[in-house]
Amino acid sequence: MSGLGLSFKIFVLAGLFAAWRQRRASLPSPSLHVFLVVALVASLTPILSQRDMWPFSAWPLVAGRAPSTVRHARVVGVDGLGREHEIDYRAWHPLAFDELMAWIEGPFTRLPAPDRDVAFRYLLEKAEGGRRRGRAGGFVEPALLGRLRAPFFILHPRRWSVPESLPETPFVTLRLHHESWSPEARARGAEVLRVLAFEGPACSMTQ
């Protein structure tokens, strides 16, 4: 345990001691109460001090003030009639959705135009392949363990859960939109502001 933090050592030792004293007790023992206090202090200290004490953390990665305007990218599929369709995050497998969107909002924007076209052709194949699988009999979990796999850090809606929820016609291209919206304005029914940032080359995709 030499490589573990002091807070973790105290937490484990207090838990083991409480379990040992509690093993034959019919009522909560004082040692159990001490362990609960240790756990509470260990959890609150990183939050109040804003300093990590592994494995107790202040979680600065995901904590922060909500901005007045939220901005993000959205990739949609476009059929032969020019209609836009949402894409299920599972269609990008084995690409993780959040990593893919981070790449699209960063490195993708710095690629030369021909390379951006190549990238969107590849993504179009992934999206269209997912649409076809769904239309053929339901969108199947692509991971080896299926629904038993560990979820992503951020959960996303399964837009293509049944065949009827998928577009009937093939995608011919993809569009990248930049969206912005205010949480307060959205609560009052305001629309999302959407700006077209990039449209991939049109490709003929057979059903």
Image (tube, rainbow, N blue to C red):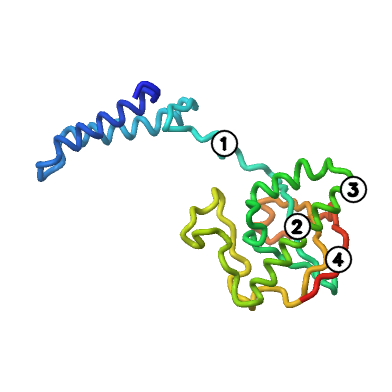
Residue at figure coordinates x 16%, y 35% from the top left:
20
Which residue is situated farthest in the right direction here?
113
Counting from the top left corner in percent of width and height, residue 126 is at 72, 61
Q: Are marks 1 and 4 in contact (CB under 8 Å)?
A: no
Task: Residue under label 1, please give it.
Answer: 61
- Label 1, label 4: how many angstroms apart (C-alpha)? 40 Å
Q: In the picture shown, does residue 31 fall above or below 78? A: above
Counting from the top left corner in percent of width and height, residue 29 is at 14, 37
Which amino acid type is shown beneath numbered disc 4? Cys
- Label 4, label 2: how many angstroms apart (C-alpha)? 12 Å
- Label 3, label 4: how many angstroms apart (C-alpha)? 17 Å
Residue 193's image quarter? bottom right
Task: Residue under label 2, please give it.
Answer: 123
Q: Tag 4 or tag 3, which sits nearer the N-term? A: 3
Residue 90 vs residue 37, the one in the foreground? 90
Which amino acid type is shown beneath numbered disc 1? Leu
- Label 2, label 1: how many angstroms apart (C-alpha)? 29 Å
Callout 3 crowding tier (Cα within 10 Å): few <14, some 14–19, many ≥20: few
Give the structural element (helix, strand or loop) at label 3.
helix
Instruction: Give the number of the mark in front: 1 or 3.
Output: 3
Task: Residue under label 4, please give it.
Answer: 203
Task: Residue under label 3, please give it.
Answer: 113
Q: Tag 2 or tag 4, which sits nearer the N-term? A: 2
Callout 4 crowding tier (Cα within 10 Å): few <14, some 14–19, many ≥20: some
Q: Tag 4 or tag 1, which sits nearer the N-term? A: 1
